[in-house]
Image (cartoon, coloured by chain):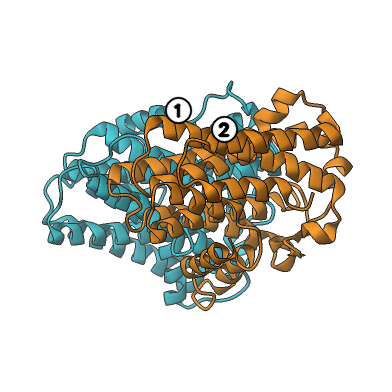
Chain colours: A orange, B cyan
Amino acid sequence: MAGVQKRIEAALERCLPPADHAPQRLHEAMRYAVLGGGKRVRPLLAFAAGALTEAPLDRLDSVACAVELIHAYSLVHDDMPCMDNDVLRRGKPTVHVEFDQATAMLVGDSLQSLAFEVLASGRLTDDAATQIEMLRTVAVSSGTRGMAGGQAIDLAAVGKSLTLPELEFMHILKTGALIRASVILGARCGHALEPSQFKHLDRYAKCVGLAFQVVDDILDAEAPTATLGKTAGKDAAEGKPTYVSVLGPARARELARELRRDAHAALESLAGAEHLRDLADFIVLREF
Amino acid sequence: MAGVQKRIEAALERCLPPADHAPQRLHEAMRYAVLGGGKRVRPLLAFAAGALTEAPLDRLDSVACAVELIHAYSLVHDDMPCMDNDVLRRGKPTVHVEFDQATAMLVGDSLQSLAFEVLASGRLTDDAATQIEMLRTVAVSSGTRGMAGGQAIDLAAVGKSLTLPELEFMHILKTGALIRASVILGARCGHALEPSQFKHLDRYAKCVGLAFQVVDDILDAEAPTATLGKTAGKDAAEGKPTYVSVLGPARARELARELRRDAHAALESLAGAEHLRDLADFIVLREF
C-alpha cells in the first residue's frame, strides 16, 4: 500500500501545474492543498479495483489523480469560513488560512477543472465511449446528486436531528458517490467485468463508502486533534447529526464492523480482490 | 438571434436540476443563478460557429449549456465577498445576497460539475475521441490556464498598473479562453473543418474574446448601473487596471473597432459565417 501511495503522490505532483508558472501563487496554493498529506483512500481504491481487471498502471494514475483532485477541492471549499470554517487540515493550516480566501476559492475551482482535464487527457480505456461515460460518472458524483448535494444537506442539517435513513442519504451523496466512482473507474481502466461481477463490485463500493463515513464520525467524536490532523469534536460542537449522535458510539462501531463484513462478502466471488479486501480493513480499522 | 436565445434558455432550463428535487435550496439557487438573464454571448457564439459546419442543433444545445454553466459558475464565485464582493448581477441581487455564501459556493461548484456532465451526456460528435478532446478544451479553458488563472491574475493586479501585454495576457485567460472554447466546440459539433479554415475561425475567436473584454471595460467606466445590470464603475473604484485605464477611453474604443474589423477579416474565406459576423458586431456595438 505504501508503494501505491508513493506512486500516487508522484502522479499528483506531475499533474499539478508547476509553482513557478503564472499564476504562481494560485499554483503554489493548489500544490499546498493536494501534496504531502492525506491517506489517499480514493486513489488506493481505484488502484485496488484496477487490479481486478488488470488495468494498466498509467491509466490508474489518471483516475486516481482525478478523484483525489475532486476530493481535495471539496476539502478546500468546505474548510472556508462560509462553510465549515476550519483552520486545520492534514495537520497544516487550511488553504484560506495559509493563503487567503480568494485564493482558496480559486484553488478549489481550479482543482475541479484539473480533475476533468486529467480524465480527458490520454486514453483511459480501449473504447473512447467508455471514457466519456467515466467522465460523466465523476461529474455526477461531484455535483448535486453527489458530493456537493451531500454537503448542502449537511449544512442544512446543522442543529437538527436526522433519522438514520436521512443521515444515510446525506452520506451516500457526500462521500459515498465519489468513493463509488473511484472503485468503478479503477475497474473500468482494465478489461470488462461481467454484469454480475460489476454488481458485486458496486455493492462493495457502497459498503466501503458508508463504512468510511461511520468511522469518520467515530473518530471525530473520539480521536484527538493531533491524530486526526484536523480539529476533533467539531461535529458535536456544531450540533451536526452523525452516526455517533444518531446511533450512539457502541452501535456506530457495530455498524462499521457489519459494513466491513458486507464489503468482504461482496468480494467473495471476485478473483484478484485482495487489495480491495485489505482496503475495507484499512478504512474500518484505522485508529480504532 | 432572439430565436436562438429562446432555444438556449429552454435548453438551460432542461439541463438544470428541478427546484423541487433534494437538495431543493441548492437547486433553486442554481436555477436563480443561471436562468432569466444574461446575453448568452458564449452560447450564441457556439450556435453561430455550428452553422459553419452544419452542426445538429441538439448537439449545440449541449455545448451552449456547458459553456454558459461554466460562465455562470464563475460569476457566482467572483461576486462573493472574498472575491469582487458585488451585490448586483443581471439586475438582481447576487446569489450570496439572495441566498447565502455557503449556498453560493456550492452553486458555483455544482454548476461546474454540471457543465462537464452535460458535455459527457449523449453524443456531441460522430467520433467519441473528438468529444473527449472537447471536454478537455472546456476543462483547460476553465482552469489555471484559462478563466480561474485569469481571475487570479486580476485579483493580484488590484491597485497595480499593468502594461498592455500583461493586461492582454490576463484577459486572454479570464474571458478569452472560454469564448474561444465556445466557438471551437460549436464548430466541432458538425463536419470537420480544413486546418486553414480552423485557423481562421480560431483567429476570429481570439479577436472577439479580446473585443468583448475591451467593450466590457468601456461599459464599466461609462454606462450606468441600470443599463449594465451590475454595479458600474467598480473597476476604477477598486483600482483595477482595465483597457480604459491603460489606454484611455478614446484608444480603447479604437481598439474595439480594430478587433471587430480583424474578426470580420478572419471570416472572409469562410462560408456560412454570417451569424459569427453579426455576433462580432453585437459584442462590439452593444450600448456604445
Q: Residue furthest top?
A: B20
Q: Quadrant of the N terminus of chain A?
A: bottom right
Residue A147: give x, y in percent of width and height: 60, 40
| Tag 2 subunit | B
Dots 1 and 2: beta carbons under 8 Å?
Answer: no
Residue A158: give x, y in percent of width and height: 80, 35
Residue A71: give x, y in percent of width and height: 59, 51
**Along the viewing direction, whichever of A168 and B77 lies nearer the viewer:** A168
Query: Is residue A100 in view?
Result: yes
Residue B225: give x, y in percent of width and height: 57, 46
Secondary structure at badge 1 equals helix
Amino acid under disc 1: Glu
Residue pointed to by mark 2: B32
Query: Is residue B36 in view?
Result: no
Secondary structure at badge 2 equals helix
| Tag 1 subunit | B
Q: Residue at x 73, y 37 (%)?
A: A256
Please indicate whether residue B232 sits to the left or right of residue B60 in the image.
Answer: right
Q: Quadrant of residue B119?
A: top left
**Residue A157: image tag:** none
**Along the viewing direction, whichever of B36 and A128 lies nearer the viewer:** A128
Residue B232, placed above or below residue B26:
below
**Along the viewing direction, whichever of A14 and B204 lies nearer the viewer:** A14
Please indicate whether residue A75 sits to the left or right of residue A88 in the image.
Answer: left
First reached walking from the N terminus: tag 1 or tag 2: 1
Residue A168, placed above or below residue B71:
above
Q: Residue furthest right?
A: A237
Residue pointed to by mark 1: B13
Amino acid under disc 2: Tyr
Q: Residue at x 49, y 54 (%)?
A: A47
In the image, are marks 1 and 2 on the same chain? yes
Q: CA distance from mark 1 to mark 2?
A: 11 Å
